Amino acid sequence: MEQFKRRNLVLRKEYMKQTILVSKKGDEMYLKRQYMSINRRLVFSFVLICLIVEIGLCSYILDWRTIDNCGGTRSECRAVEGFASNAGDVNNFGGYFKAWGRYGQGVYGRADGNDGYGVCGHASGDEAKGAYSYVPGVNGRGVQSRGQEYDFYAQEPGTNYGARSSIRWKRNIQPTANPLDKILQLRGVYFSWDAEHGGDHDVGMIAEEVGKVLPEIVQYEQDGIYTRGMDYSKLTPLLVEAVKVLKVGG
């Protein structure tokens, strides 16, 4: 901001010089044009400073550099590296990327090595997140991935997948009505995906059929007819209650 103030002072001095010059010439229109030009340069400088602040230069400590040549025996190579730190409890970004447009990609990672990672995150705090995403759109996806072997693979000994659940957050709790009848209306099928979705042989269910029985676990397209997908894990409560009915009946 100090740089902005100094720039502003220089431009004001230039304006005063032009005022003296114009008073001699008696050309008021010339003065107005110069004044508008100065204002435009001030606005441009201010916008530029705001952009610089937004990408992380407002942090107390910042280290941003590019490395063109990563040859030799170096164990690590970073084409782009950023580091931001501050003493206060505020947000800071080692790197901040934003992409507008329908198919914009704020960060795109690609690794061609046998054991490479397109995007890799590491967090060392007790409650830190190696990767975090938030998508507020109606049809937004926090994470979407596609792999030839696994779309998602849990490698380490921690819990593979966790979903929020606590009696503290739930209201209007009711038992599942007629669980066995619902199970009998569902069917499991073998099928092959179309070419656009890999063409592989698979086993599963038809989401449109499931939606007629358990609409809570199916996500529909905007037309309300075809589906985008379903949450197979939410069949578990229904199966649990259906087994209990069989046990009592047996």
Image (cartoon, rainbow, N blue to C red):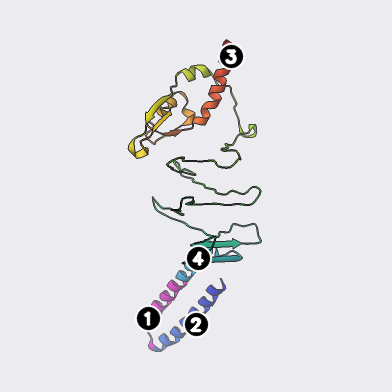
Q: Amino acid at mark 4?
A: Gly
Q: Nearer the viewer, mark 1 or mark 3?
A: 3
The answer to whether residue 42 is above or below residue 249 is below
Q: Nearer the viewer, mark 1 or mark 2?
A: 2
Q: Position of residue 130 (x, y in %)?
A: 57, 49
Q: Which residue is mark 1?
A: 30
State the residue lying farthest toward the front: 73
Quadrant of image for the N terminus: bottom right
Q: Is residue 85 left or right of residue 204?
A: right
> Residue 95 versus residue 67: which sits nearer the camera?
67
Name the mark on residue 72.
4
Q: Which residue is mark 3?
A: 247
Q: How many marks?
A: 4
Q: Secondary structure at mark 1?
A: helix
Q: Which residue is mark 2?
A: 13
Q: Secondary structure at mark 2?
A: helix
Badge 2: few (under 14), some or many (20 or more) residues near its Cα, within 10 Å? few
Give how far apart the Cα atoms at labels 4 and 2 are. 54 Å
Q: Secondary structure at mark 4?
A: loop
Q: State which quadrant residue 174 falls in.
A: top right
